């Protein structure tokens, strides 16, 4: 069983109840803090719901795999669009004087400005934006795994990415990225 989580206390609730986490936060510092609280609560769970507990932690990743560097702007533009509109969606929940302030954007998305204004290089460095060639995507997924994420929820259709590009990204993911991790998963299972 899984529980979708964004609110800080929802991660601890999931852990206490023996549920896996589907994290939809786009602030990696917050994800790491939540992961720690989740693991701690899971270890001492007092209100387990499923017969078999699920201690997996999955995080949402904006992901677009490309063949050549020149094509990554399509994926970055999609990530920029999505993150901008996520911030817009949550505006009503922010205090009036914090909107598009450093503090609001930092808490929400791990940026100090509106995502629509974030330069490509800074956007590409965001831990939960995985856009690049198969080798770059593999390296970033390795970093996320080393940080404690068990699974990635790959959001592929961010923004106005054309359908053909999304399908090509899926193809590259299946051809190069997943086989890299399948070998490691099989070895770890034995």
Image (cartoon, rainbow, N blue to C red):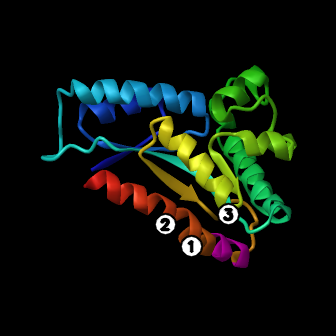
Query: Is residue 43 toward the left or the right of residue 178 in the image?
Result: left
Q: What element carries label 1?
A: helix
Residue position for label 2 = 179
Report the mark closest to the observer, 3 or 2. 2
The quadrant where residue 184 appears: bottom left
Residue position for label 1 = 175
Residue position for label 3 = 65
Query: Is residue 18 toward the left or the right of residue 158 in the image?
Result: left
Q: Distance of mark 1 from mark 3, alpha carbons?
A: 11 Å
Please determine whether, in this image, residue 133 is positioned above or below residue 118. below
Question: Residue 79 appears at what percent x and percent y?
Answer: 72, 52
Q: Is mark 3 on a helix, strand or loop?
A: strand
Of the 4 image quadrants, the one containing the C terminus is bottom left
Residue count near mark 3 (Cα–Cα under 10 Å), binned few <14, some 14–19, many ≥20: many
The quadrant where residue 103 appears: top right
Question: Residue 181 appears at what percent x and percent y?
Answer: 46, 58
The number of numbered badges drawn on the structure is: 3
**Of residues 87 and 151, the one drawn nearer to the viewer in this rendering:** 151
Question: Residue 94 appears at what percent x and percent y?
Answer: 66, 28
Query: Is residue 78 toward the left or the right of residue 54 in the image?
Result: right
Which numbered dot is residue 5? none
- Which SS does the magenta portion mostly show? helix
Mark closest to the chain's N terminus, 3 or 2: 3
- The range drawn in magenta is 164-169
């Amino acid at each position: 069983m899984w529980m979708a989580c964004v609110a800080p206390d929802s991660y601890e609730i999931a852990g206490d109840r023996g549920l896996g986490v589907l994290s939809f936060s786009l602030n990696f510092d917050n994800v790491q803090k939540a992961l720690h609280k989740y693991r701690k609560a899971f270890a001492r769970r007092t209100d387990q719901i499923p017969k078999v507990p699920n201690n997996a932690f999955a995080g949402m990743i904006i992901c677009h795999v490309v063949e050549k560097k020149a094509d990554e702007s399509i994926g970055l533009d999609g990530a920029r669009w999505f993150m901008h509109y996520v911030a817009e969606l949550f505006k009503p929940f922010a205090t009036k004087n914090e909107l598009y302030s450093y503090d609001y954007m930092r808490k929400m998305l791990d940026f100090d400005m509106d995502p629509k204004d974030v330069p490509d290089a800074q956007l590409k460095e965001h831990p939960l934006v995985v856009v690049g060639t198969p080798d770059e995507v593999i390296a970033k997924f390795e970093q996320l795994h080393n940080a404690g994420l068990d699974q990635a929820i790959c959001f592929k259709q961010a923004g106005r990415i054309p359908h053909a590009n999304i399908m090509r990204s899926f193809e590259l993911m299946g051809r190069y990225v997943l086989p890299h991790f399948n070998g490691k998963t099989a070895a770890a299972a034995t």
